[in-house]
Amino acid sequence: MSTQILAAGTTADNSTSVTVVAGAPVTVGLFASAPGVDSEAIPYCKPSLRVQIENPDESFTDTGVELDSSNQSALLIAPGVYRVARSADTSASVGVFSSDGGL
């Protein structure tokens, strides 16, 4: 079952946190929200949304994993607390969902 963790939009924002425990991967992915756009089609969006991992001091660091129209989802397998960061002025209205299990 999928859960929305970041509402669709074009402004800077961070998703709610997603916790991955050993042996229980989580998929994060994009969804589109725009008039006349098929909900399955992710429009070209730049800059990419960045997957980040929480540090012991509760700050977040980029993992190097990015979500965009070419890479619409990622499987998080390493234990940790993650979020997805959307930069200001993203070129398309996109949000983020999470889903337990593999792609």
Image: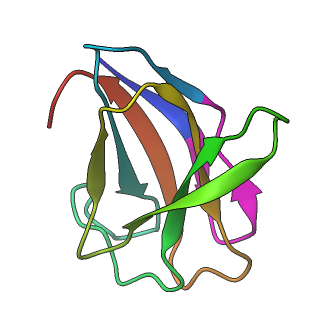
Between 103 and 11, the one lying in front of the other is 103
The reply, left or right, for residue 65 in relation to residue 42 is: right
Compared to residue 68, the image places residue 80 above or below, namely above
Q: Confirm whether the magenta stretch covers residue 15.
A: yes
Q: Is residue 61 above or below residue 1?
A: below
Locate residue 50, reporting x and y percent: 53, 64
Q: Residue furthest front?
A: 56
Residue located 28% across and 61% down the image: 72
Say if the magenta span includes residue 96.
no
Vertical order, 72 against 87 (above or below): above
Q: Quadrant of residue 90?
A: bottom right
Residue drawn at the location 73% of the way across and 70% of the way down: 11
Query: Which quadrant of the figure has residue 24?
Result: top left
- Residue 67, image x, y percentages: 39, 65
Residue in front for this viewpoint, 81 or 11: 81
Judge from the rendering whether residue 17 lies leftward or rightward of residue 66; answer left or right: right
Find the magenta span and give its range. Answer: 6-17
Colouring style? rainbow
Asked whether residue 77 appears in the rendered view, the answer is yes
In front: 87, or 21?
A: 21
Q: Is residue 39 visible?
A: no
Q: Quadrant of the C terminus?
A: top left
Q: Residue at x 55, y 85 (%)?
A: 91
State the image coordinates of residue 14 (x, y, percent, origin top left): 70, 50
Left or right placement of residue 47 versus residue 10 in this view:
left
Q: What residue appears at the point 82 percent right and 35 percent down from the top-left corner?
A: 58
Task: Give the position of the N terminus as an image quadrant.
Answer: top left
Q: Residue furthest left?
A: 103
